[in-house]
Image (spheres, helix red, strand yellow):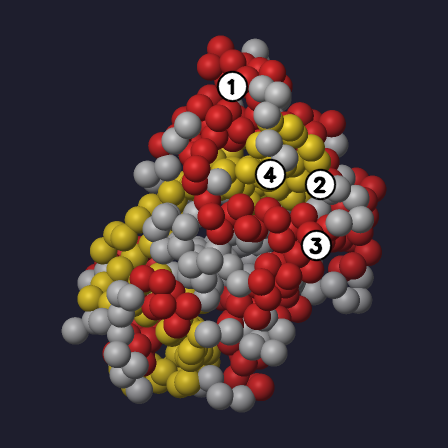
Amino acid sequence: MSSSNITIIPVTGKGQRKQFLDLPYKLYEGEPQWRPPLRFERAVQIDPQKNPGLTGLETQLFLAVRGGDIVGRIAAIKNNNHLAVHKDHTGHFGFLDARNDEAVITALMAAAQSWLKARGMRRIVGPLSFSIYEEAGLLIDGFDTPPTLMMPYGRADYQSALENFGFTKAVDMYAYWTNMHAGYPRPKIVTTMVDYIKKDPDITTRPMRKGKFLQEVQMAMEIFNDAWSDNWGSVPLSPAQIKHMASELKPLINKDFFWICEYKGVPAAFILMVPNVNEAIYDLDGRLLPFGWAKLLYRLKIKGLKTARIPLMGVRREFQRKRTGLAMAAFLSEKAFEMGREHGFTHVEMGWILEDNKSMIRIIEQAKGVPYKTYRMYEKPIS
């Protein structure tokens, strides 16, 4: 496929897969807010043999070439797991990275749309990195700060290019930046909810149990699947995905940052906070060899990090519109802050949060969280 001397080629071999993976590191080199992710992790992400999240997905990676140079990339995604749940004839796109040239983005989007149309899709939604629970959304506000761990990077010109191609807003998602030391004493409503949890004999709270890491993650993600089942674009995580996630997160998880609320002995809510590794890998160009591993180890274990992210939190649906559920969410957030301060953290990102999740937004704002980034999911009919 060719347009304005831009040729779009489907990725087919090992060499082209490497070009697909390498492009962002070349494209964003020198941009002050770019945080190069670890290259080996990106390679695992697009490998069906290593990433169980690709089970049930049909994907096609594309490269944009002009004058012999790679100038853009995109992935077209037919997620049969999503289609089984939502039955909406919707395909997705992701991994959109390109030169600051609308013609390149237009050519890439046209290729992805054409590929999805040939497979019976009537609507295209994105961007996301294969699923809504990976890197999702296009950054449209908050370009003056770097992304935290597992959050996407983007430039301002992508928004106008997508909208000029006919995309419109599907939903916005917010990220909040929170000073763990600010906002004390807490408002009465927060202290009342925290006290409610402490005084209710049916509710117990605890950190992750030692020696039961996988079981605890599986339990938390069972809560997560239930808690998020009614949310926009939600698709339950499979047992294989959960096991893979546990393996990836294990080096980052400290039991002090993984807390559970139980109601009458049954797990009902959880929170997980992890160090913001992007703070430690900003200058490694995604490489751990030859000396990157030593820098990373020093920054994680000796120097210590100052920022964290809360990527996962959930309250079972049966409690979500009740005082008990709101109190659990407030208690767990305060506990994460308390543990973070004890470990030397100063700030935490809470997000992303769907724009219509008003109860969670209120809890974050009461903890003095400030919305500092907006990510948008776009949609477009496929004609």
- How packed mark 4 is, by other alpha carbons closer than 10 Å (few <14, some 14-19, many 20 or more), is few
First-in-chain label (3 vs 4): 3
Q: Residue at x 51, y 74 (%)?
A: 55
First-in-chain label (1 vs 2): 1
Considering only vertical position in the picture, is 310 above or below 19?
above
| Residue denoted by label 3 | 214
Question: Where, by quadrant of the figure, is residue 96 drawn?
Answer: bottom left
Find residue 137 and report its horizontal and vertical position in percent: 40, 54
Q: Depth-wise, is mark 2 or mark 4 nearer the camera?
A: 4
> What amino acid does circle 4 point to?
Val
| Residue denoted by label 2 | 208
| Residue denoted by label 1 | 193
> What amino acid does circle 2 point to?
Met
Q: Depth-wise, is mark 3 or mark 4 nearer the camera?
A: 4
Q: CA distance from mark 1 to mark 4?
A: 20 Å
36 and 332: which is toward the camera:
332
The residue furthest left is 383
Q: Residue at x 60, y 31 (%)?
A: 264
Q: Which part of the image, by quadrant, shows the N terminus?
A: bottom left
Q: CA distance from mark 3 to mark 4?
A: 17 Å
First-in-chain label (2 vs 4): 2
Find residue 162 and report its horizontal and vertical position in percent: 28, 61
- Secondary-structure class at tag 1: helix
> What amino acid does circle 1 point to?
Met
